Image (cartoon, rainbow, N blue to C red):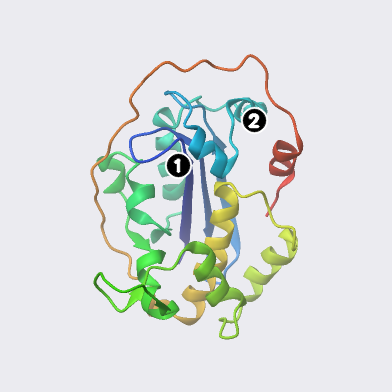
Amino acid sequence: MNVAVFDLETNGLTGSSVLSASSIVFNGEGAVLDLFNRFYLPVESLDRSAVRVHGLTPGRLLALRERAATPLYFVEDWPELLGFWAAWEVAGVVAHNLSFDVSFLPEAAQGTFLWWCSMKGLTEYCALPKRSGGSGTFKWPRLGEATTIVCDGPNALPSPEETQRAENAVGEEGMPHVSLYDCFQLYRVVGRVAKHRRHLLRFAPFLIPYSPPKKRRFATPLFPTHDVFTRKILESVI
């Protein structure tokens, strides 16, 4: 059974542009089969609060795109992501905050695959206490919290041999904190869950309203920004 994990970095909330899209496909033994990792320019003005989180300035995006002959915008390229999953015949796609990430795909694309939200699906397993109020016994785990509990904590699940090889290849330094980094952490989590708690992987149809980016004035930078940030990303391998 092949599974895909999926993560995005965006220029804000739902209805904004996707700046990077990443996916890792792996098999039932935890071996990485292929990865999708692309960068895009926004079609709207830059959201500086979002950039403070992921660091993807327009100049850096241009630098990260220099080796790629891909569309400038994710709204033109999402069929390639679907084709990537279809080519590997994935049984399902995992995103940690499924409602957010899938909202950047048109409804027709959403209906093509089965999905699992690791954030909600691992809530009971992680059993993190929540503040008073609201429904449910436990709070939804952030990806970092789920990674610590499933992969690194005292009650961590054993790493499949192939997953361990990928972790050793990446090393302790890891990757810059963009979509591929989060995708790799999610792969670590889901690889262990698929091996030892497979009953938790409940892939199902999922649909949420799609809001395309609203085109506004955006000035494309004249020059790419080459710095330590972009170099680390370009040198990152799995």
- Identified by mark 2, the residue type is Arg
Q: Quadrant of the C terminus?
A: bottom right
What residue is drawn where x is 49% and y is 39%? 50
Query: Taking the image as drawn, is residue 84 in sight?
Result: yes
Badge 2 element:
helix
Give the number of marks. Answer: 2
Mark 2 burial class by Cα count in 10 Å: few <14, some 14-19, many 20+ = many
Name the mark nearer the viewer: 1 or 2.
2
- Identified by mark 1, the residue type is Leu
Residue behind mark 1: 81
Q: How far from the left and from the top, in percent, is residue 157?
A: 56, 81
Badge 1 element:
helix
Q: How far from the left and from the top, in percent, is residue 230?
A: 70, 37
Q: Quadrant of the N terminus?
A: bottom left
Residue reaching furthest bottom?
155
125 vs 235, left or right, is left
193 vs 169, left or right, is left
92 vs 176, left or right, is left
Residue in front for this viewpoint, 201 or 63: 63
Q: CA distance from mark 1 to mark 2?
A: 22 Å
Q: How far from the left and from the top, in percent, is residue 231?
A: 75, 38
Picture disc at residue 60: 2
Residue reaching furthest front?
132
